[in-house]
Image: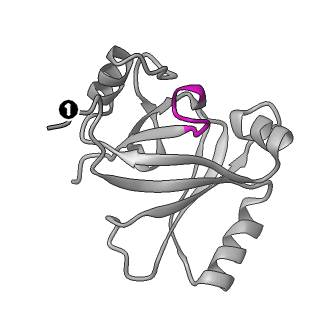
């Protein structure tokens, strides 16, 4: 039997795409793929204006596309676009407890970016695994906000 994972993902939460113009990107994904905006917000802490797009009829449990536009050129997304251009920026796994997942990964020798979870989309809690620890992929860990 394989060893217990350092962090157990329950689903692929979303795929993050860095875009220079959020409104233009939303229009593209709506017009070309029929996706619908589920969430539109500004996250000052992360330095982004963002939208979560979902397939029609998705009740919020499926995988979303997250469009991320920088609030300033010196934000993480602004720097990403300057360095790599627009495109895939991260893969996010849904977890039950992001703090526990981060601790488990750190204990397994994985570089986790923040000591404590940060504020994410729709009041979720998030942390990130450094790309150097994940085969060149920025991995986000997402603990959705508790349902009301």
Q: Residue at coordinates 78% horizontally, 59% vertically from top-left?
A: 21
* Side of 134 relative to 6 (left or right): right
Residue sticking out furthest to the front: 1
* Side of 45 relative to 13 (left or right): right
Kindly indicate the quadrant of the structure image that contains residue 9. Answer: top left
What kind of colouring is applied to the model shown?
one colour
Kindly indicate the quadrant of the structure image that contains residue 67. Answer: bottom right
Q: Quadrant of the C terminus?
A: bottom left
In the image, 32 versus 39, the foreground residue is: 32
- Range drawn in magenta: 132-138
Q: Residues within 10 Å of mark 1 (few under 14, many from 20)?
A: few
Q: Residue at coordinates 47% horizontally, 63% vertically from top-left?
A: 64
In the image, 19 versus 108, the foreground residue is: 108
Q: Residue at coordinates 72% horizontally, 60% vertically from top-left?
A: 22
Q: Residue at coordinates 57% horizontally, 84% vertically from top-left?
A: 34
Residue 104 point in image, percent of width and height: 29, 22
Q: Magenta-highlighted stretch: main secondary structure? A: loop
Q: Quadrant of the N terminus?
A: top left
Above or below residue 38? Residue 141 is above
* Side of 28 relative to 5 (left or right): right
Q: Secondary structure at mark 1?
A: loop
Above or below residue 1? Residue 18 is below
Residue 129 point in image, percent of width and height: 49, 30
User: Disc 1 marks which residue?
Assistant: 4
Residue 45 point in image, percent of width and height: 58, 32
Above or below residue 72? Residue 69 is below
Above or below residue 121? Residue 101 is above
Does the magenta-highlighted stretch encompass residue 49?
no
């Amino acid at each position: 039997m394989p060893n217990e994972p350092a962090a157990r993902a329950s689903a692929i939460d979303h795929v993050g795409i860095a875009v220079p113009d959020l409104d233009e990107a939303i229009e593209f994904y709506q017009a070309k793929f029929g996706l619908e905006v589920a969430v539109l917000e500004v996250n000052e802490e992360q330095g982004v204006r963002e939208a979560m797009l979902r397939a029609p009829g998705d009740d919020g449990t499926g995988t979303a596309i997250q469009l991320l536009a920088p609030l300033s050129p010196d934000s993480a997304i602004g720097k990403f676009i300057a360095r790599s251009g627009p495109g895939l920026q991260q893969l996010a796994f849904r977890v039950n407890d992001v703090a526990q997942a981060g601790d488990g990964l750190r204990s397994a020798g994985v570089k986790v970016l923040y000591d404590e979870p940060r504020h994410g989309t729709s009041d979720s809690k998030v942390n990130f695994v450094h790309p150097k620890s994940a085969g060149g992929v920025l991995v986000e860990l997402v603990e959705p906000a508790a349902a009301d």
